Structure formats: structure tokens, C-alpha cells
Image (spheres, rainbow, N blue to C red):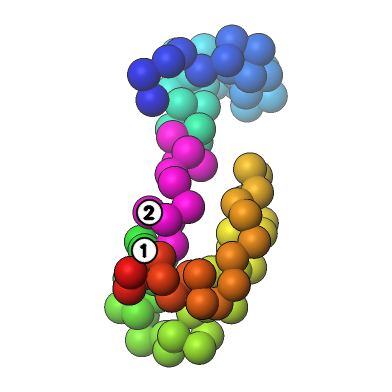
Amino acid sequence: MTESPPPDLVRHVAGTTGLPPAVAARVVADVVAYFSEPVESYVRRRHAELRRGHHRNAAIWAVLAEELAARPVAAPVLSERQLRRVVYG
């Protein structure tokens, strides 16, 4: 993340956690960067992680759809076919 995190959010995190402002700013920047990952990158990364965990694709598609729906900035609803196309092209 190249921009500074929102000052009001940094103040909130510092005030509610007791973290020093510089540490709170770093935490906020890390969280914002994590949730800024493009949907396609997220799907590919999580698919690979779940495959390494020996999950089958039939179960993976359901997990991915559930995870995407729960992200703070909601990703578009993707069908199983769309998820497969993100992974396999």
C-alpha cells in the first residue's frame, strides 16, 4: 500500500487496542493491503492452498464462494464455472 492509512481508522485502532499510533498505522496498512487483493488472485491463491491441503475441487468451489461472500468488500458472486475459469483459464 503506497498511501497512508486513513488517520481516523489509525486513531480508532490505536485507541481501542492500546497500540502506539505507528504500530496501529502499520497494522491498518497490512489489513487494507490483504483485503485489496484482486478477486482473481485471491481465487488462484486459495485454490492452490486448498489443493495442497488435499481438498477436492467439488468442495473447493463451495469454500471459495463462501469465503468471497464473507469478505468485507464483497466480491461479485461467481458461479462454479466462473471460479474454474479464473483458475484454469
Q: Which mark is residue 52?
A: none
Bounds of the magenta span? 33-43
Residue 3 location (% of width, % of height): 42, 15
Is label 2 in a helix, a strand or a loop?
A: helix
Give the CA distance from mark 1 to mark 2.
5 Å
Above or below: residue 43 compared with residue 53: above
Q: Quadrant of the C terminus?
A: bottom left
Residue sitting at 60 percent across and 52 percent down? 75
Residue 63 location (% of width, % of height): 56, 74
Residue 85 location (% of width, % of height): 41, 71
Residue 60 visible (yes or no): yes
Return the residue nearer the eye: 4 or 14.
4
Discs 1, 2 touching: Cβ within 8 Å: yes
Q: Is residue 23 left or right of residue 68?
A: left
Residue 12 location (% of width, % of height): 67, 19
Above or below: residue 89 compared with residue 26: below
What crowding class fits label 1: few (fewer than 14 Cα within 10 Å), some (14-19), or many (20 or more)?
some
Q: Which mark is residue 41?
A: 2
Q: Is residue 60 left or right of residue 49?
A: right
- Residue 23 is inside the magenta segment: no
Is label 1 in a helix, a strand or a loop?
A: helix
Q: Is residue 55 left or right of residue 19?
A: left
> What amino acid is found at the position of numbered circle 2 in the picture?
Ser
Residue 49 visible (yes or no): no
What crowding class fits label 2: few (fewer than 14 Cα within 10 Å), some (14-19), or many (20 or more)?
few
> What amino acid is found at the position of numbered circle 1 in the picture?
Arg
- Residue 42 is inside the magenta segment: yes
Q: Quadrant of residue 77?
A: bottom right
